[in-house]
Amino acid sequence: MSVVLESVANNFREVIENLREEAQKWGIDLEAVTEEVDGPLPRPFERTKEDPLYQSSFQLTLDLMKFIQRWRETGAESAESSEAWGDLTWHHTLFSAKLARALSGSRKRREWDPEWGSPDYQVSAGIASESLNKCQRALEALRPMLPAATDELEGFLTRLADLSESVHERFDTPM
C-alpha cells in the first residue's frame, strides 16, 4: 500500500510542478491568486448538498435503502418479484446521484459560465427522472406481494411522485 501512496504523492508533486511552469509561462502569479481568494473556493457538490431538492432525494434514497434491506432480510424476494427488486435496488441510488450531477451542472451554467453549452446536466436530470419512474413501477409491482408494507409503499410512492414532479419543474424533463 505504501508503494501506491508514494506513487500518488509523486504524481501530485509532478502535477503541481507542471501547474507552476504553465502559470509562469502565462504570467500568472499563483501566490497572488491564492491571496485573492477569501476562504476555500466553492465546490459545486458542497452547494448541491444544500439544495432542498437534493436533500429530499438523498433522504428518499436512504429510506428506500433501509426498506430494501429490511424486506430482503425477511426473504420477501421471489422469482416473480426479482425483477422489481432488481430495478428498485439499482435505481433507488441512481436517481439521487444523477440529480446531484444535474443540480451541479445547472448551477455551473447559471453562476459561473452562462455560455457553457454542455447538455450533460439535462441528460443527468432525464436519467434521474427515468430512475424515479422505475422505482415507482417497481414499488407498484411489489405492492401485492408485500401487503404488510402497504402504508409504507404508499408513502414511498407519494414521495417519488412529488420528487419526480419537482425534477420535471426544475429541469423540464418528461414525466
Image (spheres, rainbow, N blue to C red):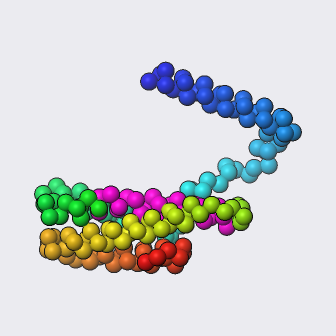
Locate residue 116, reporting x and y percent: 69, 61
Q: Which secondary structure is most common in the magenta stretch?
A: helix
Locate residue 82, reporting x and y percent: 19, 60
The residue that appears at 40% across and 68% down in the rendered structure is 130
Locate residue 67, reporting x and y percent: 25, 63
The residue that appears at 68% across and 51% down in the rendered structure is 41
The residue that appears at 43% across and 78% down in the rendered structure is 175
The residue that appears at 61% across and 28% down in the rendered structure is 11
- Residue 47: tell me if it is visible: no
User: Which residue extends farthest right?
Assistant: 27
> In which quarter of the view is residue 171 placed?
bottom right
Q: Is residue 89 magenta?
A: yes
Q: Is residue 93 magenta?
A: yes
> In which quarter of the view is residue 50 placed?
bottom right
What is the number of callouts on the image? 0
**Residue 80, above or below 40:** below
Locate residue 92, reporting x and y percent: 35, 62
Q: Quadrant of the N terminus?
A: top left
User: Which residue extends farthest top?
Assistant: 3
**Residue 67, above or below 3:** below
- Report whether 154 appears left or right of 109: left
- Residue 75: tell me if it is visible: yes
- Report whether 106 appears left or right of 84: right
Q: Which residues are magenta?
A: 88-110
- Report whether 16 appears left or right of 66: right
